Amino acid sequence: MPIFEYQCDDCGTEFEELVFDRDECPPCPKCASAKTSKLMSAVRSRVGSAPSGSDGDSAPAPAAPASSGCAGCSGGNCSSCH
């Protein structure tokens, strides 16, 4: 059962509705107007896998400074090496 997004042409309210017939446009839940339009839904997908605890939307972590830390670190300063 697909959920579609709609917008009321009279009051501008955007809402989601579970609809059985794809051509059906349900009335506005706010003003009850029958003048509603189906919106184009944005599709979200992830390519690859995100690190644990991340939803994939955050910016990548800044690169470690190019200092001569220990050899086990990625060129950074690592407290586990010292």
Image (cartoon, helix red, strand yellow):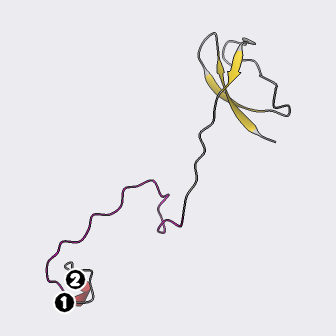
Number of other residues with Cα within 10 Å of mark 1, as a class: few under 14, some 14 to 19, many 20 or more: few
Residue 70 position in % (x across, y down): 20, 88
Q: Residue furthest left?
A: 67
Q: Are marks 2 and 1 in contact (CB under 8 Å)?
A: yes
Q: Could you say whether the residue bearing mark 1 is in a helix, strand or loop?
A: loop
Q: Is residue 21 magenta?
A: no
Query: In this rendering, is residue 10 above or below 37?
Result: above
Residue 35 position in % (x across, y down): 72, 12
Query: Which residue bears the numbered disc 1?
Result: 82
Number of dots carrying numbers: 2
Which image quarter is the C terminus in?
bottom left
Mark-to-mark CA distance, 2 and 1: 5 Å
Query: In this rendering, is residue 49 above or below 15?
Result: below
- Describe residue 15's horizontal placement relative to residue 47 as left or right: right
Residue 46 position in % (x across, y down): 55, 58
Query: Which residue bears the numbered disc 2?
Result: 79
Q: Amino acid at mark 2?
A: Ser
- Give the residue displayed 63% in from the left and 36% down from the top: 41
- Give the residue displayed 32% in from the left and 63% down from the top: 61
The stretch of residues the image draws in magenta is 48-69
- Give the residue displayed 17% in from the left and 75% down from the top: 66
Query: In this rendering, is residue 68 above or below 14?
Result: below
